[in-house]
Amino acid sequence: MNICFNIAILLLTDNCVDKIDKSLESIRSQNFDSKRIKIVFVDNASLDGTYEKLIEYTRTMDLAIYRIREKCLRTRLLQEALSFLDFTDYKYITLLEPGDVLFPDFIKSCTSVMERHATHVRRVLITETERIDASGHSIQQRPLFSESCMLQKRLHYPYLMAHGTDHKVQCFFSKGTIPMVLTELPFFIDHRDLFKTAAFSFSNEWIYLKDVLSRLSVSNCEDPAKDLMLKLYLSIRLDLINGTVFADMPKGEDNNLPSQTMINECLANLALKYAAQAYDKNDHDSAKKLMLFSELVDETILKHKAYQILAQKQKSEGLVQLITGHLVQEITFSPPFGSKRL
Amino acid sequence: MITQKPLVSIMIPNKDHARFLGPCIESALSQTYDNIDIVVLDNCSEDNSVEVASKYIKHGVRVCKNAHNIINNNYKVLDRLTKGDYMILLCADDLIKPTALEKCVNIMEHHPNVGYVHFERDYVDAHGNITELDPFYNASFIAPGEAALPIYLLTDVAQPAQCLIRRSVFTQMLGYNTEFDHTNADKELWFKLSLASDYAYIREKLSLIRIHDARESVIGFNNFFHPLAMYLSIDSQVNRGMLKNHQNVVDRAPAAYDKLAQESLHIARSCLNQGNRTLAKKYILFSQIVSDTIDTTDIFQNVMFKLNNPDNHKGGQNPEQVFIARKRNYPPPDGFTTLTESQYS
């Protein structure tokens, strides 16, 4: 492939001095012409030496660095970052969280697929990832779909919801997609995960690559109850606009879309997982609320083994391990209605 | 030299409200204020709404058909479709009285710092029967927006059809947060407007809000959308960073969550009256999640008793009517200046 375009990798930093090395090293190790990779850092007024470290890096690497004067919310930071990108010549862009790692073939594989299949509407690519928790342990993540495919418009969202929206992917966008996603959003979510934001744009078609091409760290949810409320809210909203957004889909079971019941089961499952984590941390108040939430979204949860274990053994430790085997596993779907296999 | 009066854009979003749409448009057309621009935005109605609306094209009403029903994107789309110096979102099932806009514009023109004006309302049912409501405040006034902020954490005071907005302030606050459904988006909107401008309130019933089973907010109660949006709305107001200098608002957050829990129990009771135990249980669980102390209250015990001892009493009110029974008027926010009728009529 004759490459004559650039790829921008955007990193938003906020007091993460210890996480930069890993990510930068993974960018350096890409099996791709390094001159074609434009690394752009936007620092959210960090005070832990992040910014100084980035400046230090400029001695040996070609980096663009912008520093915001006053700390702002993530959404605002992203908007600022996109305005700085106007000065960068690139065709594709990916957003890398500090501490996350791209595998050596990430850019090569993504550009190769996008060059063959991207169109003016098919301009978002998602790849599977390895997830690791704060202690460095790998967390199992079943692939979203059984094979790589090109999805019809809007179809990504319900499937992600059916994974309890806990599924991590790495995104790779054509230029212009992200600002457009932000402005076209039918509802704007100030969320830490750009992907969840982008997921709400119904105007793009998505390419799904089943290959695992990155390693993303999963931090514990700061406020699990709020996170679940937001997810439930979003899923009901999707259900409300189903009639018009999915108007051209076949009706009923033929359309193969995950149902609200399926989504609720996933949310209940997620709530139990968070509850077990809270009990393990001796945070009984949060744990109880999370169990109430699981009951709120799924009445039948009371009969589930995982719920009963939590209800009976609220004071023991190691509950996460104890219930893991009893949680409902994520589902790998067949490529949905209307998608093309890659 | 003749000075052109400022233009007021009346934006009417509609989804399947054909039976109410005619009276709504006529209420807009019959305004005593004469420089108005009326746009109907139809959000993929499946009834004959477009047919109803198109009858008014000859009166200068613009009828637009939206590509999707994006639920709460109305302000965003209508903002682009209109150019008025002032704007009002008139839901297709609601009505405004003839002098509503004239009175609001009078205030806004004399007080350039006022970014939005609220006025009072009564409820009207699907058959046109009116339920009179007590006004929220005990006087008409202008107050600093800052002083109104803590109030919006606890309640929304008014619905979109009770508010005229100055477009320059709407633009200044960088548009409209469409994260929330319209029943909460309005509250979010009042909140953001108050951060940017002064606030005026007319203690006169200049609109009629339609209460019926097909109303979006009633649907929102039934599919559990409403309480979640309320919860996220409070969280958004408290945690968005825009309140870093407003500790007086942040301090009210626990009270706001407690109030949400109490309202949830009122709705639960209404659901039980209607025989919907499943939904009632959801609201009860929700109240326990959002408030740490709700299960010690009398209303909680009362609702639990009702849940566990179902009687034959059925056919209660729809959930929205639960909120009708406000029995007191509140004094205006701090720093207010009273408005007399002669100042805005």
Image: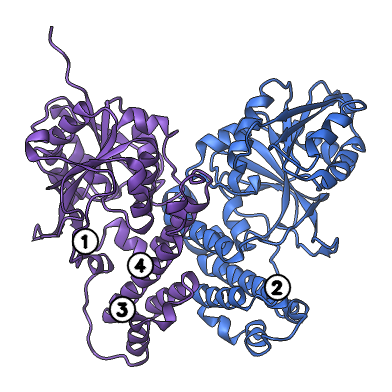
- What residue sits right under mark 2 in the picture? A277
- How packed mark 3 is, by other alpha carbons closer than 10 Å (few <14, some 14-19, many 20 or more), is many
Foreground: disc 4 or disc 3: 3
Q: Secondary structure at mark 3?
A: helix
Q: Residue at x 62, y 86 (%)?
A: A311
Q: Determine the residue located farthest toward the front in the rendered image.
A: B335
Q: Is residue B89 visible?
A: no
Q: Chain of mark 3?
A: B
Label located before the other in sequence (4 or 3) = 4
Residue B301 figure quarter: bottom left
Label 4 and label 1 in one chain: yes
Residue identified by numbered label 3: B269
Q: Which x, y percent locates residue A89?
A: 73, 21
Q: Closer to the camera, B141 or B82?
A: B141
**Amino acid on which the number 4 mark rests in the picture:** Asn
Q: Is residue A242 above or below residue A262?
A: above
User: Hue of chain A?
Assistant: blue
Apparent side of residue B182 relative to residue A4 in the rendered image (left or right): left
Residue B137 located left or right of residue B246: left
Chain B, colour shown = purple
Q: Check if mark 4's residue and mark 1's residue have beta carbons within 8 Å.
A: no
Which of the marked residues, 4 or 1, is nearer the chain's N terminus?
A: 1
Q: Amino acid at mark 1?
A: His
- State whether discs 4 and 2 lie on one chain: no
